[in-house]
Amino acid sequence: MKIKSRISALLSLCMLLTLTACGGGQAGQSSAAASSQSGSSAQSSSSSAQNEDTLVEYTAEGLGTFLLPEGFVMESGEITEPLPSRYATFTKDDYYIQANRMGKEAYEAAGASLPTDLEEYSTRSGVQNSVPEGTQFAYDDQGNYFAQFTQEDGQICYYVLLKGTDAYGCVFLTAPAEVFDAETAALWLSGSQLV
């Protein structure tokens, strides 16, 4: 769990670097925020056993909604310094998922402009610092703008960039190689929507 906490902190820091590369930054501190989970269901049509799970909607206030199998434990919060952002983590079995969102207010505080689209967002330093050098982003069969890579600890990461209303962010799924399935990751993360 320490590795996942470090990865979470590193990716949050990299998201902040996306902004501070184009503007100023300050020291960091975080505060917890309430989260909620609602139960609207959707069925997957994939033949994979993992994909046959019933998907439910998880809502993180100020961040977005996520369609994942039942049973994930969600925690969410807000970072106010050096720049305002929201995050949520989801854990279940060997799966770890984290989502982050930085809105217009964060870009303004950094003196940076919002990216024009996901392709431009993928070139920002914070995103590039979150993936191994040379990683390429592309669209998967579910419409996610993603990159997939192996982390230093051997876990596979499926990293999806997201665009919300005057906001950008990401959601990524990590799992051990023996349980990771790219089709499942693409399906689960395709239900992610930032506010």
Image (cartoon, rainbow, N blue to C red):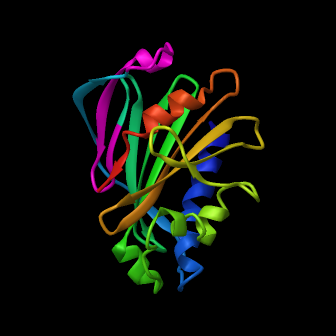
Which residues, given as a range, are shown in magenta? 45-66
Say which residue appears at 70% left-offset and 27% top-offset: 177
Pick the quarter of the image with the C terminus.
Answer: bottom left
Q: Is residue 62 magenta?
A: yes
Q: Nearer the viewer, residue 109 or 127?
A: 127
| Above or below, 55 relative to 136 | above
| Whole-percent x, y for residue 83 in the image | 45, 73
Say which residue appears at 58% left-offset and 51% top-offset: 138
Numbered-mark total: 0
| Whole-percent x, y for residue 164 in the image | 34, 60
Residue 151 vs residue 58: left or right? Answer: right
| Above or below, 29 relative to 68 | below
| Whole-percent x, y for residue 19 in the image | 52, 75
| Above or below, 79 relative to 184 | below
Say which residue appears at 65% left-offset and 63% top-offset: 128
Q: Quadrant of residue 73?
A: top left
Say which residue appears at 78% left-offset and 43% top-offset: 152
| Above or below, 133 relative to 37 | below
Q: Quadrant of residue 191?
A: top left
Q: Nearer the viewer, residue 70 or 32?
A: 70
Residue 68 vs residue 145: left or right? Answer: left
Pick the quarter of the image with the N terminus.
Answer: top right
Q: Is residue 167 magenta?
A: no
| Whole-percent x, y for residue 4 in the image | 62, 41
Q: Nearer the viewer, residue 8 or 161?
A: 161
Residue 151 vs residue 47: left or right? Answer: right
